[in-house]
Image (tube, grey):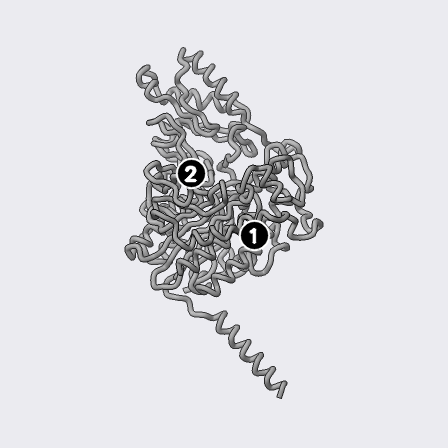
């Protein structure tokens, strides 16, 4: 009798598993989820493969379509540019997000990519979080989704960093949420609503950051498992405030040293906190549960913060990805239970890659170094003063773009193209500069390959500088801690599509990150974003 019961139980279990693995996908996706891991290099999947669980990164790779040759096609790979390119299917030359910051010639001020004085922060008394997507100049695939059914679909974007929440939510998003740096609560903008939804206030009221920071950050695995990293204590790490750069980390002490809750964003528990809030958003907003497809963006940004402090070869960054893998496993399992993987498209990627510090490269006799941009600016002004007897030609220089004082040049009846050419030739003579190109050339010529093509894709007439500097591989402007170049260590990122009707496999086909938005639009059978230049990827089973 017991044997019969056991056989029946096994048969039922087998049948249940067969049914769950062969669920019929909906005609269109019910939910699209983009997952950004900031600063994630494409080779991290190989490097940490044997440390991952079967249900996180491995599940996405083994059951999804993995593009191993996906790249951003522009020169200045700043984080904000990556998010805007992903959702619009266009390059900075079209969507206008040319950098995290740019110089505004009209008011002679540095402008943040999402600043908007017409809105105010919601959920905080701070006056500094006045953000909206107004600076993004074209539509995104989620805008087109909301337009297709006149705002029946829901669009929500979540990240600890403001720009990583605001730009993916785009113009018609229902909500973008980011962290208040003072207390690590989730806040938003009056661009979306006049007060936080009640479920967000309830979530904030649970004070999860206090729980995360009331413990130590220990390595997830035993120390011998981090054999592909530099030693835990090495001279190439900046470390936390106070000089702390070895495990274990007392997070309460670090909170006191750093002066507040923002320390959470520099630990892997910040990623866990983001994941937990995303799960709460799905449940409370009932995403993926009606006839209209919804879109959720999640950006895990602790990875880039930790890279900045500890480098791409540190034990800290390895531990961050191992812990993130466990968070992904939990999140994917939740999606499967709540919406069904067969009804969901998950896209995992990054805003850009990461590179070794020039200090490390120099130490191991690899090419690289710091481009001394402030020294170069001083010498350039001296050169222009000698040639033109004028010391007012340079208006602003950020290490990548040189902005000329165009009004003064016009008033002095000087030749703009000639000045640009002379500056470009002068700058190439400086250590660390590979090439330099003026806006007159970028506007009048058509470059089809290489970094000059990427410079053209980065250039927007109203926001970019007059001269674009192309540094040598391995070089970084000394004044720019967030520099991103057009070389592959920054431009190449992982790209995985998973779920719904997606084929499983891998491809070495050259894929531009502008291809993602039109592909998602094709899945949804809606109009492509209005400035999209990408192609549709053929990745459906039927």
Give residue 168's position: percent from left, percent from top: 40, 47
425 w.r.t. 319: above or below? above
Which residue was labeled with disc 2? 126
Residue identifier under label 1: 324
Name of the residue lying farthest toward the right:
224
Crowding around mark 1 (Cα neighbors within 10 Å: few <14, some 14 to 19, many 20+) is: many
Residue depicted at 55% across the width and 44% down the height: 264
Which dot, 2 or 1, sits closer to the camera?
2
> In the rendered image, which quarter is residue 5 located in?
bottom right
Q: In this view, does 288 lie above or below 484?
A: below
Give the position of the N terminus as an image quadrant.
bottom right
- Looking at the image, residue 364 sits to the left or right of residue 72; the answer is right
| x, y percent for residue 348 | 49, 52
Task: Give the tally of numbered discs.
Answer: 2
Secondary element under disc 1, as helix, strand or loop, is helix
Q: Is residue 404 visible?
A: yes
Disc 2 or 1, which lies upstream in sequence?
2
């Amino acid at each position: 009798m017991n044997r019969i019961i056991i056989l029946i139980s096994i048969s039922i279990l087998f049948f249940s598993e067969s049914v769950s693995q062969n669920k019929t996908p909906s005609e269109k996706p019910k939910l699209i989820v983009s997952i950004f891991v900031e600063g994630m290099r494409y080779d991290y999947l190989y490097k940490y493969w044997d440390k991952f669980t079967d249900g996180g990164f491995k599940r996405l790779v083994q059951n999804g379509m993995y593009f191993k040759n996906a790249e951003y096609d522009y020169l200045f790979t700043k984080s904000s540019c990556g998010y805007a390119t992903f959702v619009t299917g266009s390059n900075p030359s079209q969507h206008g997000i040319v950098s995290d910051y740019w110089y505004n010639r009209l008011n002679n001020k540095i402008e943040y990519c999402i600043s908007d004085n017409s809105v105010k922060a919601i959920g905080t008394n701070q006056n500094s979080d006045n953000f909206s997507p107004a600076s993004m100049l074209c539509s995104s695939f989620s805008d087109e989704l909301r337009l297709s059914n006149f705002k029946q679909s829901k669009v929500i974007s979540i990240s600890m960093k403001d720009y990583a929440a605001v730009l993916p939510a785009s113009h018609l998003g229902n909500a973008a949420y980011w962290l208040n740096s003072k207390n690590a609560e989730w806040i938003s903008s009056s661009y979306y609503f006049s007060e936080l939804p009640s479920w967000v206030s309830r979530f904030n009221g649970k004070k999860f950051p206090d729980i995360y920071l009331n413990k130590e950050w220990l390595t997830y695995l035993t120390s011998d498992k981090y054999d592909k990293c530099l030693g835990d204590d090495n001279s190439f790490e900046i470390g936390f405030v106070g000089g702390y750069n070895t495990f274990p980390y007392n997070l309460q002490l670090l909170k006191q040293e750093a002066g507040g809750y923002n320390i959470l964003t520099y630990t892997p528990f910040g990623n866990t906190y983001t994941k937990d809030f995303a799960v709460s958003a799905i449940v409370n907003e009932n995403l993926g549960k009606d006839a209209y497809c919804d879109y959720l963006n999640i950006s895990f940004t602790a990875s880039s913060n930790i890279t900045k402090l500890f480098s791409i070869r540190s034990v800290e960054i390895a531990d961050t990805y191992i812990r993130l893998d466990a968070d992904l496993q939990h999140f994917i399992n939740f999606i499967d239970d709540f919406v069904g993987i067969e009804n969901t498209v998950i896209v995992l990627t990054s805003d850009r890659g990461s590179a070794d510090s020039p200090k490390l490269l120099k130490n191991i006799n690899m090419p690289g170094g710091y481009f001394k941009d402030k020294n170069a600016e001083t010498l350039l002004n001296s050169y222009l003063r000698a040639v033109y007897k004028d010391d007012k030609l340079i208006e602003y220089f950020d290490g990548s773009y040189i902005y000329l004082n165009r009004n003064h040049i016009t008033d002095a009846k000087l030749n703009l193209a000639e000045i640009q050419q002379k500056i470009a030739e002068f700058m190439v003579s400086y250590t660390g500069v590979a090439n330099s190109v003026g806006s007159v050339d970028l506007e009048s010529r058509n470059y089809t390959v290489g970094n000059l093509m990427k410079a053209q894709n980065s250039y927007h007439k109203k926001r970019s500088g007059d001269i674009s500097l192309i540094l040598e591989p391995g070089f970084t402007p000394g004044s720019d801690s967030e520099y991103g170049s057009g070389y592959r260590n920054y431009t190449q990122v992982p790209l995985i599509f998973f779920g719904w009707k997606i084929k499983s496999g891998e491809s070495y086909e050259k894929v531009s990150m502008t291809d993602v938005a039109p592909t998602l639009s094709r899945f949804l059978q809606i109009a492509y974003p209005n400035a999209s230049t990408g192609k549709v990827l053929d990745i459906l089973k039927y």
